[in-house]
Image (cartoon, coloured by chain):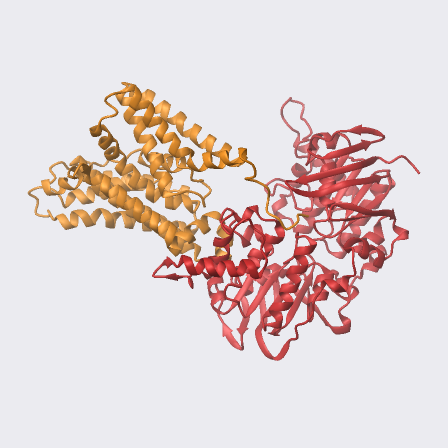
Chain colours: A red, B orange
Amino acid sequence: MAEPVIRLSGVSKSFGLTRAVCTVDLEIFPGEVHGLVGENGAGKSTVMRILAGLYPDYQGGIFVAGSEVRIRGVRQARNLGVAMVHQELSLVPEMSVAENIFLGREPPAKIPGFISRSKAAGRARALLKEIGVELDPRQKVEKLSVARRQLVEIAKGISQNPKVLILDEPSSSLTAPEIRDLFKVVRRLAERGAAVVYISHKLEEIFELTQRVTVMRDGARIASQPTGQWDRASLIKAMVGRELSSLFPHRHAPDKSAVLLELKNLSRPGAFQNISFKIHRGEVLGIYGLMGAGRTDLAEAIFGLGPAAAGEILIAGKNARIRSPAAAKSYGLALVPEDRREKGLVLTQSVARNISLPALKIFSRLGFVKRRQEAREVAAIISEFDIHAASSSVAAETLSGGNQQKVVIGKWLVRPPAILILDEPTRGIDVGAKAEVHAMIDRLASQGMAILLISSELPEVMGMSDRVLVMREGTLAAEFSGADLTAENLGGAAAGAVSFAGISA
Amino acid sequence: MSPDRTRPGAAGPGRKLLPALRDWGIYFALAGVVIAFALISPEFRTRENVMLILLQVSVVGIISTGMLFTILTGGIDLSVGSLLAVAGMFSALFAQQNSPQMNLALACAAPILVGLLGGLINGGVIAAAGVNPLIVTLGTLTAFRGFVIWYRVNPIYNLSPAYRWIGQSSIGPVPLPVVALVLTALAASVALNFTRFGRYVYAVGGNEKAAAAAGINVRLVKLCVYLVSGLCVGIGALVFTSRLGAAQAIAGEGLNLQAIAAVVIGGASLFGGRGTVAKTMVGALIIGVLFNGLVMLNVSSPVQQMVIGAIIITAVWLDGMMRKKG
């Protein structure tokens, strides 16, 4: 076999006391598409960010074409031929497609210090044509859809003519035809001799596209072997480290006689259309779909954060007018938002103050906060949800992701709501905390709460839910329950009529 | 990725010094400046001078208290100086000696009402229209000043003795304006620490989206902090006008920047969510002591300004440094 283009030997990286990556060995060969899989928080992105020069304080050795290098920054990584397309889009919306692609490497004009827009546009056009994307390079990025931005992001990576291109979950916001285009681009790149590292949660894509798969778990490399030697079960087992079924407690049973929440043709142009469904007491209703399918918009509309333009919301059979979160709260609704740092927590404030915030009205008389009652009830929540914090007065930002998430959920349970909306409740938290959140969902449903569980993780949404609705491009595409609740059905409905197997066609 | 454990920190004896310095540094800074001037200048360390400093700080301190509320929500109120001139003018209209309009109760109530009205305009536009507070209050800074000059360009001098008593009398050795400052600061401190409104102010400033998602009426909170700022301007205008014994259209120029400086030296974040009344008062005192002490040392006014400018930047820079390391 050829010499690896990049070899990692015993690479480690810690954040404070937390070891994110632990003595990882990895070989990446030219001309191969190398799949990198693992659960959220397994350390996949961290390893690749080390390669891309974002964490210069790593330990261990990195060898490029056989000789050891110390990667100290993004620019150096780029010069070594490493380009990374990040999971979070990092484009400047106000700038054009061409300007974004060549940001920091603008082609110079004849007069020194000036840049040539026409050259940049020309090169961008050629590049986009080469990868088969129809886009005007002069268009502003803010006018593009999320999927097209992702393609610009990939074009930006490819424009550096890299020896190693790292794609971190590039398909999460793409539709099936766009994924097909992406695969074509990736294959063409590999044929030209570049190595592509493909990080993805979607195992179908991994089997479809890669020649070699590396599995990571809890910061360590578990295994690395040719794709042909893996099958679905062995891959999942390597990723999770145990049998899947034990992860999902399912003791709750819905009470079909009591509808707690009903939507009738809820619509908001550009986000979601004609959404109708019912949730019963004690039921976990899953909503699955790709990024950008409108799930978060729907959750926020129900909770009054971005009210719907048309349609009805019925709470316990009665028409509810929900124009603000305060109104939603009074109807017994609660929302744990998708991005806990953006909408879930006041990071600089203490854990206690975060927990008591939604219930502060209950804790106060004549505008003054009854501090003793507050402290008592906050302490009860901290112990009930096993929130690990040095004390309840430390800032929320000092907690780990899993504990932060428990704070966001816990703050709504000071006075338990009748209907709890959870938007990606386990994103970015470690396996242990994830299991705790799952147990919590099951317990709350057993107590009669109706839970709307929005999740992009198939095992989670399948394991926890009584029924699963699939959203695609703002509409409800399908509903599955019982024996129909399979990964194939859900994945197929989420991606459109084209099934994953059809992508290769 | 991370095990369920809080981040490391505060372990070992060496690590305790920095947080302590961060929390108490501003008090040490004030103590240091006071001791330095007291050692150098005998005039500085007299009781009369201490009361003079407090008196000089009282108006800025009252205005800074209101400013703190707006800054805590991530906003700002640039209009305070202009609004003070308007409020002072309306106060003086009812305090002229031998005037048929003379009415002490109205002279006290008018600046408060004008202040609240100004706050209502600022807060109303910011909350309802969602325009950036910097822009809104930059606009009203100009508009309020324009209004008061247009309304009455000539100063009002002949204010009644009863009215002037408010700003010029003392309770024991303590001037009444200083009492007003202490009461304002105490009330503000209670509001921020013990009431629901105070919690909401910190929450909105710390993370507006999270506050909204927790069911807090963010717009109402924003409106209220500008009302508080306007109220403080009203109190400040009453104290200022009665102490001076005159009202003029150019009153309060530069007051906005002094108030912002006091809040920021006191360690508040301009992005909101962080700051206390006590430290804001210390910030105001540091500025007051510096001006007074430099005068005692016969430092000329332009040089004073340069020194104070440099100190504002240094204080905030040091605060940021310690925050990063802590």
Does residue A478 appear left or right of residue B201 in this picture? right
Residue in view at x 63 percent, y 65 percent: A441
Point out the residue furthest to the right here. Answer: A1
In this rendering, the answer to whether B313 lies above or below B107 is: above
**In the rendered view of the protein, which quadrant contains the N terminus of chain A?**
top right
Outermost left residue = B98
Q: Nearer the viewer, residue B62 or B194?
A: B194
Q: Residue furthest bottom?
A: A257
Out of B22 and B14, give the one closest to the viewer: B14
Q: Tell me: A158 left or right of B15.
A: right
Q: Residue furthest front?
A: B13
Q: A130 or A13, which is in the foreground?
A: A13
Q: Position of residue B62 (x, y in %)?
A: 29, 41
Question: Residue A228: percent from the left, percent from the top?
Answer: 90, 52
Q: How many numbered callouts?
A: 0
Does residue A308 appear in the picture of this structure? Answer: no
Q: Find residue A176 and report its image quarter.
A: bottom right
Question: Would you say B214 lies left or right of A438 here?
Answer: left
Return the x and y of residue A481 as percentages of the image width and height: 72, 72
Q: Position of residue A213 (x, y in %)?
A: 84, 48
Quadrant the C terminus of chain A occupies: bottom right
Residue A209 makes an appearance in the image: yes
Q: Residue at x 60, y 43 (%)?
A: A93
Q: Residue at x 58, y 62 (%)?
A: A299
Q: Residue at x 73, y 56 (%)?
A: A175
Vertical relation: B102 (above or below) A111: below
